[in-house]
Image: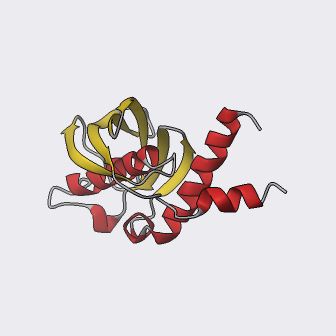
Amino acid sequence: MKDDEQGQQLAQAVAEDMYALDEAARSLAIAIDNVGPGRARARMTVREDMLNSHRICHGGMIFTLADSAFAYACNAENKSTLATTCSISFASAAELGEELTAVAEERVRTGRTGVYDITVKAGDGRVIAVFRGNSYQVKGETVPGLEARLQAGKT
C-alpha cells in the first residue's frame, strides 16, 4: 500500500475510534464525514437547544464544531495532539435548522507544534466563522495500539 493510502487509512481508523469516545461531538450530533492526514470535515445542524437569546446559534456551539474538526485533523496521524490556543472570528449568524460544515486544514506542522485553519460555512456557502487552532503533540498515541491492529489486519 502506498504511503498516502496508509495515511488515509490511519486517519479514518483514528477518527472512528476517537468518535466512539467523543461524547461532546455525539451529543451535539456533530458528524465527522471526511478525514485525512492534516485535514477533517465536520457537520452539525443547528437545533433549538443550540440557540441563544437572540434566537441564533450560540457562538460556543459554532466554536465546538470548529474545535471538533481541528481535533480530528491534528490527531489524524495517531500522535496524541492537544490544542494550546484557539481563536474564532464570527462573520455571520447561523439560524435554526441550518447545516454548518467546518473544514479543518493543516497550515504548518513542525516538530511537536502545528497551526490549523478551520472555516465554518452554512449550506448556502456563506462563511459563519473562521477559527485558527494551534496544537502541541504530547507523548503517546491518540488510539493506543491502532497501528499494530491495522498491520495485523493486512495478513
In-image side of 57 versus 121 (left or right):
left
Classify residue 7 by image quadrant: top right
In the image, residue 51 lies at what x, y percent?
25, 61
In-image side of 116 versus 145 (left or right):
left
Q: Which image quarter is the N terminus in?
A: top right
Question: Hey, which residue is sitting farthest left in the picture?
Answer: 53
Query: Measuring 36% from the left and 63% from the top, which residue is drawn there?
Result: 47
Q: Which image quarter is the C terminus in?
A: bottom right
In-image side of 60 versus 43 (left or right):
left
Query: Measuring 20% from the left and 45% from the top, which residue is drawn there?
Result: 85
Classify residue 112 by image quadrant: top left
In the image, residue 113 lies at what x, y percent?
31, 38
Question: Hey, which residue is sitting farthest right in the picture?
Answer: 155
Q: Relative to 2, does residue 25 appear above or below in the rendering? A: below
In-image side of 118 versus 103 (left or right):
left
In the image, residue 18 lies at what x, y percent?
49, 62
Classify residue 16 by image quadrant: bottom right
Q: Is residue 100 visible?
A: no
Q: Relative to 26, does residue 66 appear above or below in the rendering? A: above
The type of colouring in the image is secondary structure
Tally the numbered discs.
0
In-front residue for pair 75/92: 75
Query: Measuring 45% from the left and 44% from the top, which residue is drawn there?
Result: 73
Q: Relative to 86, does residue 111 appear above or below in the rendering? A: above
Q: Is residue 14 visible?
A: yes
